[in-house]
Image (cartoon, helix red, strand yellow):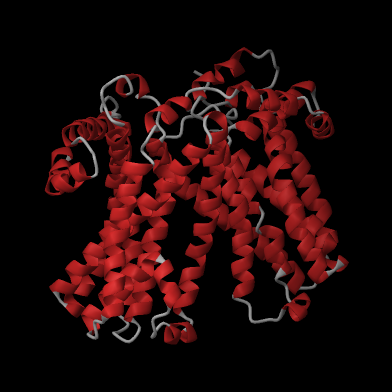
Amino acid sequence: MVKFILILFRPFRKMIEWAGINYQQFEVILQAKLTMDNRKVMGNNSQRKGLKNALLTQTIFYVFIGGMLTGMLAKGNGALFFFLTLFFSFIMIMVILGLISEFNTILFDTRDNSILLPRPITPRTLLFVRVMHIMVYLMLISLSLAIIPLIVFAFKFGIPSMLLLLVDVILITLFAVFLTNIIYLLLMKITTGEKLKDIIVYSQIFMAIIFMGAYQLMPRLVENQALIVGFQQIHWWMFLVPPFWMSASITPIINGGFSLQSAGFLFVSVAMPLLGLWLVTSVLAKNFSQNLATLDQGDTKSDKKKGKAEKSSIVDFLSGICSHTKEERISFSTIWRIANRDRKFKQAVYPALGYVFIIILMTFLNNNTPLSEIGSTKKYLILIYAPSLVVYILVFTIRFSDNFKASWIYQIIPVQRPGYLISGAFKAILVQLFIPIFIIVNIFTLYFWGLPVLIDIVYGFCSILMMTYLMLQMQPPTFPFSDEKSTEQSGRNVVKNLLMFFSIGIMGGIHYLLVYLKINVLFILPVVLVILFLLSRKYRLTPWSKMVNMN
């Protein structure tokens, strides 16, 4: 497989060398990296099987999504331009999301610095290897999305049209990868060290939220007939949006009517990915090796600031309010500070904070009720239970860490019950991340629906906590940041996500039923509080015998 991938690059050797890349060094390093990827789990058959299953599952998922997109392409020639634009937009969004969530670590990986940086390898070659290493996996995503549309295109419009679509899919993937890497490399030019790492993490979070919003918005555009009609004409601003370059160049070739304007789009669709290649390899690659080396260095000023921040009495005050024992209080303060500076944890959790507002926004965009009349509806239940997405993601994420081997410290702590530690950790992330979001969202609930729904907000908050503690009881208890996130857990994570959304539906459904039957939730609230107290107490008193990962 590695040799086949390398063969695919060889027809472009002259172009790669034109960009100032040492092709022999590029091929040797890329071959080594891809070979290492294949050998990472060779020593463990179960992990190897898990990796293959995860890759196969991911590919099948993207093929399925691509099949759903095919329905847009099959609707006819009249709306071909509009649906092709959505198709290319979807591919671009999925590629960028994949890069910023999964493969950005390849670009900034510092583990091989000691091997590669002392060698006579130009910064251009080193950077290009990393970008192409990412490209191999992202091209798998885009081609998986496009395989069924390509087949439909071949039957509906002919083989030449299918080949044009395939070329445009490759071009939009190249442009998406180069665009994202250009942003990252510009950040490397501006700052270095710890500040660069923080900026990268927050930029990834911001981009993930933006593109997830676009992902939610796109299917709703398909049903907008006025928008489809508006796409019958070409506008100047379309030259500023990459998916239009591809759709506006291929549509006239298929439907006829190729013009000077179409030639302009065709030129831009080919030239911009090449321009991105030139910018990455010739302009932004300068000093890439030196900037990469600084990622291994700490930022003493930021460390001092963090040290001062961690002395804040607010955390200690909150831990005193939320904790029952000294052990629980110490765990609360420690996990609060770790979650506040752990970049991988932020990268996994913070996008969920934005997703909550996107879900709420999409819900109200689908609503035909004017805002002035929204107070007469029961939409407030969505605002009450949407933040539960955050707390469930927190529960699933807090157990994982890249430094999981350091969890041996838990085993030597002189604590009678480990439940004090895991309970304090859960309360820390709850107070730090969930409760602020819940309060912000439900301020809007009170604004639109008034004080009569205040008791519903309190009931919903207690109901979310009750269901969360119930889910904690259903899975084996483990210490925070003590487990390794591996590919074997992909299937289990899917099941957990389904269970999470199912539980949100159960809570919201029960609350809706109570409101529909005009049963005052104030009568049910004491029962929920008692169950919540019992579940939290049982979790806090978890014994050592039930803990996992106690090697």
The residue lying at 30 percent from left, 49 percent from top is 277
455 left or right of 477?
right
Query: Is residue 467 shown above or below 293?
Result: below
| Location of residue 291 in the rendering, given as x and y in whole percent from the top left corner | 44, 30
Marker count (numbered): 0
- Horizontal side, residue 437 vs residue 313: left or right: left
Picture coordinates of residue 314, whole percent (x, y):
81, 33
User: Of all residues shown, which one is farthest toward the right?
Assistant: 451
Name the residue at 69% across, 44% down: 433
On the question of residue 242 being in view, the answer is yes
Residue 251 image point, x, y percent: 28, 78
**Nearer to me, 219 or 11:** 11
- The answer to which of 5 and 223 lies nearer the viewer is 5
- Depth check, front residue: 13 or 342: 13
Quarter-of-image position of residue 326: top right
Q: Quadrant of the N terminus?
A: top left
Q: Where 377 falls versus 192 (above or below)?
A: below
| In the rendered image, the vertical position of residue 540 relative to residue 369, given as above or below | above
Q: Is residue 350 left or right of residue 297?
A: right
